[in-house]
Image (cartoon, helix red, strand yellow):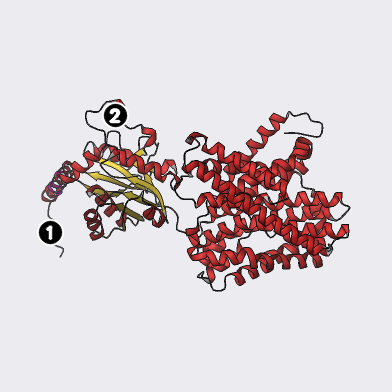
Amino acid sequence: MINPDNLIPPALTLAGIALVSLICQLMAWRLRLPAILFLLLSGILFGPVLGLISPDEFLGDLLFPIVSLCVALILFEGSLTLKFDQLKETGGMVRRLVTIGALITWGVISVACYWLIGLDVALSALFGALVVVTGPTVVVPMLRTLRATPRISKVLRWEGILIDPIGALLAVLVYGWIMSQAAGHNAFLASLAIFVQVIGIGTIAGIAGGHLMATAMRRHWIPEYLEVLAALTLVLVMFSLSNHIVHESGLLTVTIMGIWLANAKGIDIEEILVFKEHLSVLLISGLFILLAARLDLDALLALGLPALALLLVIQFVARPLAVWISSIGSELTWQERTMVAWVGPRGIVAAAVSAFFALRLEQAGYEDAALISALTFAVIIGTVVFQSATARTVAGLLKVTEPERRGILLIGANQVSRALGEVLQRLEVPLLVVDTHWDSIRQARMKGLRTMRGNPLSATVDSNLDLTGLGTLLTLTPEREWNALLNQHFRRDFQAHRIFTVRNERAGANQRMQISSKHEGLPLGQEGLTFSKLSSLISQGAHFKATTLSEGFSYEKWLEDAGKTRFALLALTPEKRLRVLSPGLELVPEAGWTLIYLATGQDEKSAEAAAVVKREHAQTEKDAKPELPDAV
């Protein structure tokens, strides 16, 4: 990291920021809290508190161009997830939130800032415009830990991405109005001209960039391995070019580009989306640390109680009022509306744009402009900390969270899958069985299993597949190639260590004809257990059973008794979390766990023989015991 004496090399500074970012992300994952909370605190600690990071000295004039380009990439990545078919239920509310809701939020916050903080009308209006935005950088990580229902998640995700360019546009208009007044020009006409220019250039450039990228991918002008690089380069070029023509029109450009690509027909953006998602995590982490390190703690602490009062107005007046008015006529329940009203943290766009405008206004002679940046960070920290600490509790009280992902998705409704599904259902494990064969699905339904008939790779099934509460994938079909393809397809929905398959070696095939294990999921059960073997055993009378381990009957003891007649496959913890036994995972079931295994016909005969011996032994002891005379 760096200090005022420049004793630490720049390379070590960047490495230090990356390390701190990783630690913050790991802490957030472990504690199930938004990472932004730890990133902000780390930036403040290593910046103004310890003086180890000084972004202005480290990056100089490159700081804001770098921040702007990073924000563009983050916003583009978020907009790639916005598909129009997600707006069937919530489209009207999203439109009202980013228009009517944004104006209500701006008005309430501007008035509150004027009365509570004492800034003049112009600066209060600018601050209100800056903190209108919520942003995907804080909303999306919060949604991961919140596990809200799909309708809440869609509303907050769409709003967070669309409100960023709208908030930036609003801030540009207010800034133009302030500078026009200072220059003695007609402020209204100047603001109107800026509005038309930003909307026009941003829309044209966004559509042009999105159409160009989609056409290049559809017509294979670019090889697949260069598609990610091409998209990344085009985003940076279009953003910079748009901003060069009309200041702050770039955010609208990259947002429209992302939405255009997300909804384009005949192209696959999965590789771009996966790469951009990883890149976004890195950029968000670094940016929050850098911008928090620039914070003037003295200016922030000097705000005192008025800043706290302003934060309360934002949380309990501006946000609820905007949401409830915007939700009139929507299908959201009052619980869902309340949850949307509760979640509205401010993020990286507000921080970056406020720092930029504060610097410009200070240079123009506005002495109070420095307060805007400090006040914006106070709102960011306040909303992130408060909502991170309370959102999960509020969601639980309102009962608007998805169930924990402890269930299993079974691909294949054959006799193996049906037999396993029956045991899992008796143990109250949520499951969904998917297959293309009607007869197999019919038999699964007769056993009371939740099913869905269709090809998991089809667009219809893919868009309607309800994975709520399902955190494990198990492909149970006899075709190894089909299993591998499905495992690759569902990597976007399930973590790699939660994807399993029953392997089936192709008889007599050499190594050149075998599928690489890296394309498959982790193997189910012990080494060498194939679908053919499972199916054969079940046809011969084997069936799945469940037994609970204890201190006196441990897993090691069970293995001793099992021999070659039982095959352990799954285990259920006392908290009802499903665990899959696989050679690739060092998993040892403990006391209190329920073990799910396949018992063969030989095991049944051995059990019956043991029961007979036990009964004979008990009868022998009874016969040998002397009879006592009846009591007098």
Q: Which residues make up the magenta segment?
A: 609-618
Question: To which quarter of the image does residue 105 belong?
Answer: bottom right
Q: Residue at x 14, y 56 (%)?
A: 628
Query: Mark 2 Cα within 10 Å, few/some/many (few <14, many 20+)?
Result: few
Residue 401 visible (yes or no): no
Q: In front here: 324 or 406?
A: 324
* Relative image position of residue 381 (x, y in whole percent): 69, 54
Q: Secondary structure at mark 1?
A: loop
The image's mark for residue 513 is: 2
Q: Secondary structure at mark 2?
A: helix
Q: Is residue 8 left or right of residue 87?
A: right
Which amino acid type is shown beneath numbered disc 1? Answer: Pro
Q: In front here: 531 or 176?
A: 176
Question: To which quarter of the image does residue 461 belong?
Answer: bottom left
Q: Which residue is mark 1?
A: 629
Does residue 420 show up magenta in the picture?
Answer: no
Mark before the other along the chain sequence, 1 or 2: 2
Which amino acid type is shown beneath numbered disc 2? Answer: Met
Query: Would you place residue 532 above or below residue 397 in this image?
Result: above
